[in-house]
Image (cartoon, rainbow, N blue to C red):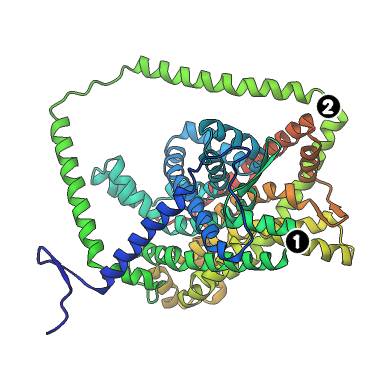
Amino acid sequence: MKWNGFLNINNKYKFGLADVMVILMLLSILYLTAHLGAGMEVPFSKSNQPAMSLEPHMLPYYAGRSLLRMFIAFGFSLLFTFVYGRIAAYNRIAEKIMIPAIDILQSVPVLGFLSATVLMFMALFPGSLLGVECAAIFAIFTGQVWNMTFSFYHSLTTIPQPLNEAAKIHRLGTWSRFTKLEVPFSMIGLVWNSMMSFGGGWFFLAASESISVLNQDIHLPGIGSYMAMAADQGNIKAIAYSIITMIMMICLVDQLFWRPLVAWAQKFKNEQSEANEVPKSWVYDILKRARFIRYVNQTVGTFFHDVKGRFQQRSSLILWPKPPSLLSKIVVWIIWSLVIVFVAKYVYEAVLEIIQLSWNELLRVIVLGLQTALRVFISTLLAVIWTVPVGVMIGMNPKLSRIAQPIVQVLASFPANMAFPLFTILYLKLGISMNIGAIPLMMLGTQWYILFNVIAGAMAIPSDLKEAAAILRLTRSQTWVKLILPSVFPFLVTGCITASGGAWNASIVSELVSWKDNTLQASGLGSFIAQATTHGDWPEIIWGIIVMCLLVVLVNRLVWRKLYAVSAKKYHLE
């Protein structure tokens, strides 16, 4: 008797071994989520705080808690990306405010405001650890969301005109256009930028899980707080255990989550001929073979189709009243007035603090900001020089991509500030000035934004264009000039914007480093804000952040926005 599956639904879906594996995996995920999530709602007070242990057997539990925070933050980041990016792409008035706002938010050192967010969330959930958990998730969210939002926004602004016209001809509604055009077209870039954003969240993990507020140290159970506690106690063995655990965790997430997504995203590639080689994933192969997935898809799809049909049938019988234009204008005016009043209040308070500084101090901060801006520019340029050839090589070679992807993931996800002491020791021995040495430290955490975007751009090159280049017998230099560089240019611009913003943020920790009794300091805005924060000098802190925001907006408007416009008009598929 031949094996025909052990479960048959409607004589159509015969479940087999792949279905068993998928169902067991889903049940395991649900169980682990419930088990790990239960620890987020335990009682919390000054005298009742979560206990932390450096015992190695606790590492799997801590790793699971950290992963749960990372994925919750990623979910909120994805939701924010779709809503914010879509509004900014299609509303020109909102775009002028929303995109500069992201430029500023990704550059401002959010960890400096972590204590305030902890107090806010603790007030929302008094007596529960959930408040501190929400603050930690929010900190991770701020490390993930901006890169993803930029990627989705840029994809929407570069949708080819034929696809837009096809959507109009088929009269796609807002939801249909979003699901059938916008998300599929942006998928490859969004997946790779999500990988980078997820990796960027690891940078904030140690700081978000180990918090000092109200004269008390709070250590949330997690791999980040484990690593921070091991470093504080000088426990080299525990540090080694945490590093090994983090590498294993990154590789596991890559195999079970990111690699299947990369393989699945290739179906949305804009091309007319099939690629010779495509990224592969054993998990994705199992999911494709599982009839259970197709059964659930069809059942859910049929349910929502019926609900949508009934809603449209009933709504067609109702004459929905249209809001008067005057009322709409009044509502918009009230909202803008509240925003202006809210902003004006904080501007007024900031001005009261800033007027305490002399003109010489104000000008000195501007000069320091220009010095940091020069380092940001050099670090971004150096990153472009090596990431473009390497990213193109990985993106255009699926076999190399399968090997390089987990390696790049580990390098990009490992907290860059953990390597700062090694560079500090090297600079002390070689006598290197921090005015130069701060540049490599900036690059440690920002160059990966450019690399991941270039890889995404290279993978998105249609196979028919590659075949056309081969038929025309273009030389290697001609292929780069005529095909590769124009194809990856839009992705490169997105990577440079997020990398430069990350470099501004990283300047706070990269321009002032220490090892034992030795402190190395670069002359720049980052070290100025770091020292002002240490001393609690609010006028200097506020003026330093304002200067940083102004410089970021100025550079983005004069350089990156113009390059964005060029990539949208000249270097996208028609």
> Which quarter of the picture shows residue 13?
bottom left
Is residue 344 visible to the viewer in this orientation of the structure? yes
Q: Earlier in the sequence, mark 2 or mark 1?
A: 1
- In this rendering, the answer to whether 482 lies above or below 87 is below
Q: Which mark is residue 163?
A: none
- What residue is shown at x 30% (from left), y 42% (from top)? 175
Task: Please provide percent x and percent y for residue 480.
Answer: 55, 69
Q: Disc 2 marks which amino acid?
A: Leu
- In this rendering, the answer to whether 199 lies above or below 215 is below
Q: Secondary structure at mark 1?
A: loop
Q: Residue furthest left?
A: 11
Quadrant of the drawing holding the C terminus: bottom left
Compare residues 97 and 504 and report the one nearer the observer.
Answer: 504
For marks 2 and 1, give the CA distance. 41 Å
Foreground mark, 2 or 1?
Answer: 1
Q: Which mark is residue 234?
A: 1
Question: In the rendered image, which residue does mark 2 sit on?
Answer: 357
- In this rendering, the answer to whether 514 lies above or below 105 is below
> Which quarter of the picture shows residue 83?
top left
Task: Please provide percent x and percent y for residue 437.
Answer: 80, 59
Q: Answer with left or right where residue 71 lies relative to residue 289.
A: right
Quadrant of the drawing holding the N terminus: bottom left
Compare residues 130 and 189 and report the one nearer the observer.
Answer: 130
Q: Disc 1 marks which amino acid?
A: Gly
Q: Answer with left or right where residue 344 lies relative to residue 98.
A: right
Mark 2 packing: few (<14 Cα in 10 Å), some, or many (20+)?
A: few
